[in-house]
Amino acid sequence: MSAVLVVNSGSSSFKYQLIDMDTETELASGLVERIGEPVGHSRHNAGPTKADRSERDLPIVDHTAGFAVMIEAFSQHGPQLSDASLIAVGHRVVQGGNRFFEPTEITHLVELNIEDLSEIAPLHNPGAVQGIRAARASFPNVPHVAVFDTAFHQTLPPAAYTYAIDKDLATRYRVRKYGFHGTSHKFVSEAVATFLDRPLADLKTIVLHLGNGASACAVDGGRSIDTSMGMTPLQGLVMGTRSGDIDPAVIFHLRRRAGMNTAELDDLLNRRGGMLALAGNGDMRDVEDASIAGDPVAQAALDVYFHRLKGYVGSYYAQLGGADVIVFTAGVGENSPIVRAGSLAGLEGMGIEIDPVRNEAKSRKSRVISTDASKVTVLVIPTNEELEIARQTLATINRTHPSN
């Protein structure tokens, strides 16, 4: 067995998953959270049942202590890391800027570059750096690989990534569209080709990654040519707590008239916006339940959500010069027939028709939800960002350590 440990670190938590790369199956997963608080929490899943789950509450002073807790959970509850033959650790890093075009083995210099990019990703990269340092100390004898959310979008043409502001200012402060959710968009667009048994190079695909964070991506022959998130994950679709697209002058207006400072405006758009602001709840399941019960506020929020999504579908249909496939993925996209139907309603003139029966059918598998007559195939494909990170990690170490 050859296993890759995938780590997704934030400022006060990290998730992990151990994957057998021979079979591409999950061996274990877990979460270490509330790092730095008086009482932290860890959860370890050594198998698919509740009996395989173990949880602990204890002080976890920093990420290094958190990795010690994780290693102890593997030791006590399995699987044993020595038996799994750990060959690498893959790290999700949100922002690679225009420095990292592909997954990269982590050296001290790479680590410093990721830390430097915290300037344009202050909510994400610092946590990743903490996780990388703790993981490299905990597993010093295996290679570590950074897999960047932004890397898949390095194929965007200048027309798609350039903002119409002063060029020198934009260059100096790295202001451009970077895009995010790249591991998911890559995984799903490739899974579409496999599912349809068609060459990836022949497909024009619109991927709708809809979760608490949400983004759309236009993929032409396996290459990202446009995506909805921008310099940060705030731009684009309406999300759970993020506003998505907004007139920049709104910020100036609220600064002048409401006296809001930068921190308050950041909080307003990133943590108090989106469905939370529109419906009073950032969980799409609760918003849908309220709408079904006749709540006009919830229905109005869904209407805004659908309107924004349709706009991006139409835009990417045009940018691609037509579309072969529209695919829904992530928590909302995979599980909400209401969102899928509402997002594409009225687009029959573009050759997009959803079959109501197929759309309502519950399944965890990849499936077609469009009618047989639909010119554009509409799919639901479950994403697996951890597996994609593991695959890219394995490919990187095979390239950099061919003797292994």
Image: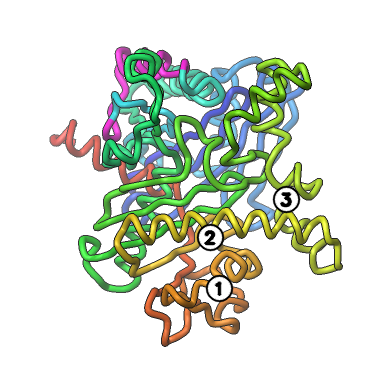
Task: Characterize the magenta stretch by its predominant secondary structure.
Answer: helix
Give, as a three-letter code, the residue at label 2: Lys
**Which numbered disc, 1 or 2, marks the residue that appears first in the sequence?**
2
Vertical arrangement, residue 257 with respect to residue 312, above or below: above
Q: Residue furthest left?
A: 403
Q: Please report the residue visible at 60 percent of the width from the left and 71 percent of the height from the top.
A: 341
Percent position (x, y) of residue 133? Answer: 45, 17
In the rendered view, tell whether residue 48 sits above or below residue 340. above
Front residue of this view, candidates 301 and 181: 301
Question: For residue 111: magenta?
Answer: yes
In the image, 234 versus 399, the foreground residue is 234
> Where's residue 131, x and y in %?
49, 23
> Left of 290 or right of it: where is 31?
left
Say which of marks 3 and 1 sits in front: 1
Residue that carries the numbered disc 2 in the rendered image = 310
The boundaries of the magenta stretch are: 101-119
**Amino acid carrying mark 1 in the image:** Gly
Asked whether disc 1 touches disc 2, contact meaning CB atoms under 8 Å apart, the reply is yes
Q: CA distance from mark 3 to mark 1?
A: 25 Å
Element assignment for label 2: helix
| Residue that badge 3 annotates | 283
